[in-house]
Image: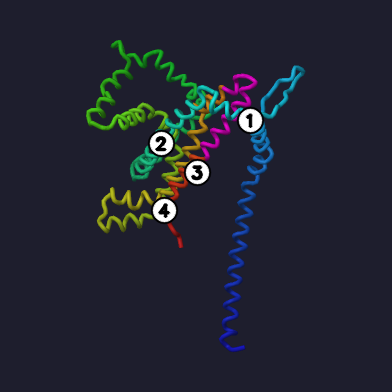
Amino acid sequence: MTKQAVSAAPEINEKTLKRRKIASLDKRKARSGWLFVLPFLIGFLFVYVPIIWNSIWMSFHTLSIVPGGGYTLEWVGLENYEYALFSDPKFVETLVTGLQELAFDIPAILIFSLFLAVLLNQKMVGRAAFRAIFFIPVVLATGIMESIEGQNILGSYMEETGGIEDGSGSSAATQIVSALDIEQLFASMKMGEGLVTYVVDIINNIYDIVNRSGVQMLIFLAGLQSISPAIYEACKIDGATSWETFWKITFPMISPMILVNGIYTIIDSFTTESNSVMAYIQGVYRGGTDGQVHSSAMAWIYFIIVLLIIAAVSGIFSAYVFYQKRD
């Protein structure tokens, strides 16, 4: 054996040992990750999987109540799905209307939460207080407050009472709307009717958009704060404007967060109690014996549509997502 081979042997052994240490560290991290998600996996396998299977099974059967107690199931194949798509007069209409509403709401929520995150990421007095204020609706929109909002009790009360009376015979809310006259304002700019309707709907639904933008805002904030200040300093030295810096640095760097927030917003919007399709399916479920099997078929049709939308959005967004390499 030559001297060169002898000197190379310790180096090879050191590299091999280093690789083994890295591999063993990765294995330990993987085991820790599995231990972390183990409670969820146990609950999913023993609680959710039986419920999911029961729902799928019932969607292919008709249900009959036994006089002495209990029920019997009779296999009917795709009959419940055919009823939901072709016989029920309102399910498809409600489904299409709900999808159209969400197609407008989801971009508005993403744009609004990104706008807020950019503003709240600036250096200013009371920044932490403003962040807490914009996140408060997320905390309040749980439990009884969510039920009140889902039933639109406050909105119905305001409509019945005509808003806040100021003694002049007209409500303050009516005065604000008539003073601004949003529709006439945008119509005078000679914009398209569809764009005018979209902007007016966003303004009218600003309360709901703010309530549903808190989590997305925090995720965007985390992404903005992960961008190195040195990158912005380099852009400033090169003479880049704030507009150019946003579109060429900030926007690409937070594109992974846009993908995450897009998927989260879709799932949250499709499963909230205020969703018209969810409310309709729940109403069908309470409608009697046949309603239980019909609602199961409707729920799985809705679930498949949501999965397809998420897959489409993920595929489109992933083509434009920029992942920073940290070597």
| Secondary element at image label 4 | loop
Query: Are the residues flagged by discs 2 and 3 in contact, CB closer than 8 Å?
Result: no
Q: Whole-Å distance between the Cαs marked 3 and 1?
A: 24 Å
Mark 4 nearby-residue class (10 Å; few <14, some 14–19, many ≥20)? few
Q: In the image, 176: left or right of 99? A: left
Q: Residues within 10 Å of mark 2 (few under 14, many from 20)?
A: many
The first of marks 3 and 1 along the sequence is 1
Q: From the viewer's perspective, tell me whether residue 38 is left or right of residue 116.
A: right
**Kind of residue at badge 3:** Ala
Decide whether the magenta segment is chiefly helix, strand or loop: helix
In whole angstroms, how far apart are the C-alphas of marks 2 and 3? 20 Å
Q: Which residue is mark 4?
A: 322
Q: Which residues are magenta?
A: 284-307
Q: Nearer the N terminus, badge 4 or badge 3?
A: 3
Residue 38 placed where, x, y %? 65, 46
Q: Nearer the viewer, mark 4 or mark 3?
A: 3
Residue 144: x %, y % from top left: 53, 25
Q: Which residue is mark 3?
A: 311
- Of badges 2 and 1, the one in the foreground is 1
Query: Is disc 2 placed on a helix, strand or loop?
Result: helix
- Specify few, some or many for label 3: CA neighbours under 10 Å numbering under 14, 14-19, or 20 or more: few
Vertical arrangement, residue 32 with respect to residue 171, above or below: below
The kind of residue on which mark 2 rests is Ile
Name the residue type under label 4.
Phe
Q: Disc 2 or disc 3, which is closer to the eye?
A: 3
Q: Is residue 130 visible?
A: no
Q: Earlier in the sequence, mark 2 or mark 4?
A: 2
Question: Helix, strand, or loop for circle 3?
Answer: helix
